[in-house]
Image (cartoon, grey):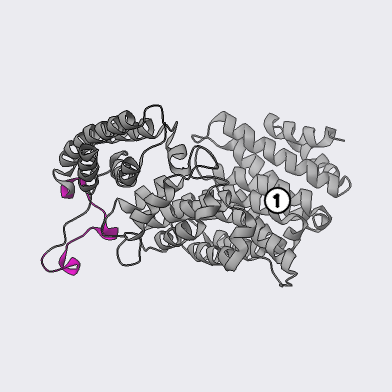
Amino acid sequence: APGALRLADAVSRASKLRGSRRPEPPGGWGSWGRLPGGDLSAQDAGDLPERAADAGSVLLLLLAGLAAAEGREAPGVPAAGPRLRSVLGPVYVFAATHAAERPWTSARSQSVARELLAELLRATGCGSVAEFLRGRNEDEEGRFAAVMGLLKQELTKDTWKRNPATKHVFSWTLLHITRPWLSHYLESVLPPSLLISDDYQEENKILGVRCLHHIILNVPAADLCQFNRAQVVYHALYNHLYSREAPLIEAVLLCLLDLLPVLERAQRHQKETRPTAPCDEVLQLVLTHMEAEHRLALRRVYARALPAFVQRLGIRIARHLKRLERVVLGYLEVCDGPEEEARLGILETLRCTIEHAWPRMPCRLPVLLKALLKMIWDVHTDQGSTPEPVKAALLQGATECLILLDRCSEGQVKVLLEGVYSSCEEGRVRECIRKVQENT
């Protein structure tokens, strides 16, 4: 027993060598020439990877020895003893810090960290990291609370950037906790996620938004709405929509699409009457940005997300038809590269809009018909690098929109296309028109 205690004490002391924390300079943190966001470069890391690998190797031996000592004391008992439990959290944090490719890791330190994680699982009788964190069953308490207790001091507003590994350990750990366990720890994981997402650095914003998205997906709506948490998350995400960075906008839109049903359900239960729902507010801002956006990367992100917003609103999309029409016409005119992601997304948006707001389509028929025919002609005459499957998808999407327009206009499209079909000699264009005319 005394030997096991000495081993436990050694493991606890050694595991504090995280390897990625920078020593505080004599003049304090204000005099330190840090990278933006407190991140390390490979050059800054110096010999940290090798020192971490050496420390990890020692921890591996000590952990195996401690597990063996407790196994001899209580043979046949799979649960970790009190001395082993006292070091599981620090050892896990050390291993998680070095398990992935980072500026402060090397191939050797990553390998040692993964071995250390595997040894942790063996020592506790767990089959996965998720099981280690949440517990093997509902009656067993996992180690997530202990890990968060260790990270808590490093996840405050004043300290979270001092150690660039902390945010990665937190996010990696969070993603392993799913329903129904995550709701028990909501108060400890939501503030750090909001804090990271509120940073000025794009990488941190995206990381924080992904943490928020995971929380939204894995916490019951009732818990999210309690204490107005969902509204706080909504406002944090909404502010990010003013960003000009495509990866961040994509992450935010995906997160909002899963948060909006939670907000709308809460409003129905509370019987609130608002002139516009959160989904309307988001779509209004997105359409405003889309209308003036000229960068292809952002146009593609917006166009990919737009159909889901139309589906979410349903018939309420009629409120936004004027601005949506301008966006559709503008995006159909512009080729956005070989994959044509923007135009394909806009065609899908138009199809969904016609399906949900078909009574409002006949008055817009001349404008939409002209835009679709022009796009069909542009695709047919395109001599660029657009692959044939992409061209076929564009023509198919345009044809489906024409068929839907014809149905909601009681056959007006067929009448208008008769003259075009008889005067057109291009086989591909004629094929699209023929499909519309033959559809019943």
- Decide which of 74, 377 is in the foreground and name it: 74
Badge 1 marks a residue whose secondary structure is: helix
Residue 302 locus on image (x, y percent): 55, 53
Please determine whether, in this image, residue 346 is positioned above or below residue 364: above
Q: Nearer the viewer, residue 436 or 255?
A: 255
Residue 321 location, x and y as percent? 72, 61
Question: In the drawing, does residue 177 fall left or right of residue 403?
Answer: left
Q: Is residue 145 magenta?
A: no
Q: Which of 403 and 381 lies nearest the eye of the viewer? A: 403
Residue located at (46% from left, 56% from top): 189
42 is within the stretch colored magenta: yes
Q: Which residue is mark 1?
A: 311
Residue found at the far left of this picture: 26
Q: Quadrant of residue 319?
A: bottom right
Residue 347 location, quadrant: top right
Coordinates of residue 68 in the picture (x, y in percent): 29, 29
Q: In which image quadrant can residue 222 be found?
A: bottom right
Q: What residue occupies the far top of the structure in this picture? A: 76
Taking the image as shown, residue 351 lies to the left or right of residue 393, namely right
What crowding class fits label 1: few (fewer than 14 Cα within 10 Å), some (14-19), or many (20 or more)? some
Tell me if residue 59 comes above or below residue 408 in the rendering. Answer: above
Q: Which residues are magenta?
A: 26-44
Could you say where residue 396 lies in the image, as x and y percent from the top left? 68, 35
Q: In which quadrant will I find the C terminus? A: top right
Asked if one can make out residue 91 in the rendered structure from this viewpoint, the answer is: yes
What's the residue at 65%, 49% (across, down)?
A: 307
Disc 1 marks a residue whose amino acid type is: Gln
Q: Residue at x 74, y 64 (%)?
A: 269
Say above or below: 121 vs 313: above
Is 205 positioned to the left or the right of 280 in the image? left
Q: Nearer the viewer, residue 138 or 355?
A: 138
